[in-house]
Image (spheres, coloured by chain):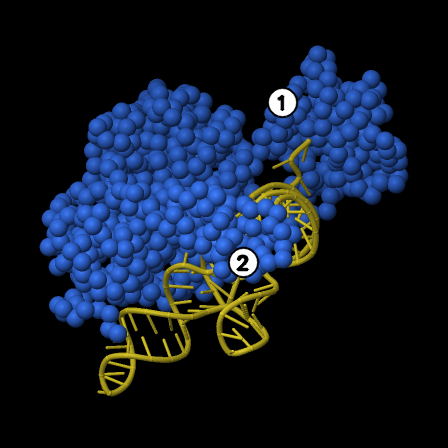
Amino acid sequence: MGSIPTRAAVSEYRPQELDRKWQAHWAATRAFEVTEDLSRPKFYCLEMFAYPSGHAHVGHVRNYIIGDVVARLKRLQGFNVLHPFGWDAFGLPAENAAIKHGIHPEESTLGNIAHMKGQLQRLGISYAWERELATCMPDYFRWNQWLFIRMFERGLAYRRRSTVNWCPVDRTVLANEQVIEGACWRCGTLVEQQDLEQWFFRITAYADDLLDSTEALSQWPEKVLTMQRNWIGRSEGARVTYALADHPGSVDVFTTRIDTIYGATFLMLGPEHPLAQQFAGLSDDPTVFRAHLTRFRSQDRSARISGEVEKEGFFTGQYAVNPFTGERVPIWVANFVLGEYGTGAVMGVPFGDQRDFEFARKYGLQIRTVIEQPEQPRVDPSTMSEALPAEGILCQSGPYDGLPSGEARRQMTADVERRGIGEGTVQYRLKDWGISRQRYWGTPIPMIHCASCGVVPVPDDQLPVTLPKVAQFTGRGDSPLASIPEFLHAACPRCGAAARRETDTMDTFVDSSWYFYRFADAHNDQRPFDPRKVGYWAPVDFYSGGIEHAILHLIYSRFFARVFRDLGMVDHSEPFTHLLTQGMVLKDGAVMSKSKGNVVDPDTMLQKVGADALRLYVMFVAPPEKEVEWTDSGLDGSFRWLARVWRIADQWREEALVAGPLESHALTSDERTLRRKTHDTIRRVTIDIDQRKQMNTAVSAMMELVNDLYAFTDKGERSTQAGAVAREAIESLVLLLSPFAPHTAEELWEQFGHQQGLGSARWPVFDAEAARAEMLVLPVQVNGKVRGRISVAPEADAGEVEAAALQASSVVPHLEGRTVKKIVIAPGRLVSIVVA
RNA sequence: GCCGGAGUGGCGGAAUGGCAGACGCGUUCGACUCAAAAUCGAAUAUCCGAAAGGGUGUGUGGGUUCGAGUCCCUCCUCCGGCACCA
């Protein structure tokens, strides 16, 4: 039974033609450009901008499609939608390519941008391209410099010595990302550590703000919030001063367990601790002492590579006084004490800390029981096989005996404060953000070093400090800018004397920490942005991107939002209201990469099936957060389905065009059924995209509607209203589909007689009355197993439903000879009968 | 080690505590065709059964409930993050 009536010849679905036609139309009508409009609600939809590597693969593209579905939905819902795109255009790969191939980074970057922009346009992503920005352009990075100076003025940008990764063969500093298992990614040489003067951003000033506000980010994935909280790593404790026993001076330690201080039988310094150096001089053999220190310090780095390094230490020959017990305790240097956390020194409590326990056992240091559990005998240290970190009741702790741990911490902290030998403090794992890069292809740090005035900012009216043209990239020497005399030599802005320009550039994460504000006012040449424009558009309502930025970019951006807030330029603290972290697209079980040769090129797919099938497939294959494996057969399926939509629309077009208005009271049963499906689909697709961000189930819902449309068509029913009902179904479908398959949708919309285009269409409205079922079919369970089903009116009361259930022919046999104990009715869901 | 997340057909996946496997891929069958492709339709967890029907089934074992993929507890596996943070 060939179900398709053979009236007119069915027109063929040729998506590539539609892509061209509608992309040209959108460009000509500037369909996605926007301006501020206070009469309409705004919606700022953003995908993380791209590093212009040269070619976007389908893994990148997935993110842009997710954002485009949301942006197109929101436009149809009547929002004024800002949906911009730009380029994270500074960075090491371009500079390394310059070293290797001799192409200037600017040239290769701009070329890559042009190519990738073409790729995105061919996908029909609805960007407001007039707001496009590239961070490597002076009209963008001058505002990095402007902001840097504002931060410098407020003490949020400062300079100090710090340790960096240094490759001795390439003679250059490497970013952490470029250190692969302790070695330089380019030449494979083991990376060394060097102390250099570096610029830092004082992100730690906002540690509590950043931490506390995670509570308010209700539309962020819990996973990302957890990662950020761990990264900030707030821990409450106390700083306690130990006096040296035999010399003037003291050592501060940080502890979260001051309640165990009576068990602190020794003290440990990290190898970087200044006192360790001093003690070397006092020791019997300073040379051996210093050799140990050096060995520990180099160990610390290799420990990160190999994982575990055995806990080791040595006695310094010096003693400190435990301020609570008054005992002399030996001071050791230990290889596992971190110089950069807390005070760089810790008290050793072998009873309660596993590391201290192992250390004490190894070197025969005293272990003292200071916590006991109610109703249990006091632990004998000689029988312990591991530390007992649990809280409990203090013992052998002088006047604090009998106190529970928490209360003891409060009292003991108060007591050290009263005695002036410490205080309650908070420590963070978060460190200030080192932004100096000894590289060329980045934003020059706008500072001048003057022998008499010190570090002086470049005056605002001399910004931007631009990058000098470099003819040859050798990859040798320190900062490439340092070897360019025209750049290096500058007059001090304050005294006019000959001075030296800062030759480091900024970490590219600076560029990406505020680009979302610049999009609101992308061409402002007076300031980074007009606060009124940002006030209209920001914060970003929907932000999507890779999970790899869960900490880095997303915490830096939250930090910058606070800086702008405190500069009075934005009125919020959180820049991204709703965050979606999209999963990666794998091919052959691995992340796509050029080196693995498993890249799926979107352009190849576009030639094969068109933009819409690619977009639809990527949305249908799995929920957006999930990692997915690319399959060609799935793509073919999406193409076939779009062609199926095309054909059914073609079937009904003529009848739809001549059909009169839909009269809901005059419909046949089949017509009412299709109508119900239409409106149920509107409801489901709207919720799936708008609220749940489950694009895959939205597509499923549309597929069901199309299946029902075919079934409806198959019945051959041609009442006066059939065309009107089919028209409503197809037009609704076209609108629901348009965020996913905009080219096909525009074409069908036009074919159904709409001259205005989807730009002036409105998202379909769910009609609850049309979606209401006439009869409900309820399953009937007997003792938890489905034994039959009954058909009841939606408004039937409990008594009627109960009676129908008990009389259902397939149910009756299961009730025979048994007593009905209970009947549970889940309204509109099922009936559950419990029998004895 | 600590902190997250996840385990459902051959595959991707779906299920406000209410008919497990929607939708799609694949496979099989039918229609159309001289034939094939495309298309349209049907079937497709598993076991017993000719069928009607029945049993079993969402990593493991328990629990709560009239009812558990979903909630609670135990364990196993996988993925991700942090990892000597005192």
Residue A191 as seen in the image, left or right of residue A50:
right
Query: Taking A233 as reference, is B7 above or below it?
Result: below
Cβ atoms at labels 2 and 1 below 8 Å apart: no
Q: Element type at marker 1?
A: strand
Q: Residue at x 54, y 58 (%)?
A: A812
* Chain A tint as drawn: blue
Sequence-earlier tag: 2 or 1:
1
Residue A381 appears in the picture as rendered: yes
Give how far apart the Cα atoms at labels 2 and 1 are: 73 Å
| A573 or A622, nearer to the observer | A622
Q: What is the quadrant of residue A655 in the picture?
A: bottom left
Q: Position of residue A273 (x, y in %)?
A: 66, 31
Q: Name which residue type carries label 2.
A: Val
Residue at horizontal 45 percent and vertical 22 percent from the top? A155
Q: Position of residue A786 (x, y in %)?
A: 53, 57
Image quadrant in which the N terminus of chain A is located = bottom left
Where on the picture, by quarter, is residue A514? Answer: top left
- Residue A307, which numbered label? none
The yellow-tinted chain is: B
Above or below, A540 relative to A610: above
- Which residue is label 2 attached to? A812
Q: Which residue is mark 1?
A: A425
Mark 2 or 1: in front is 2
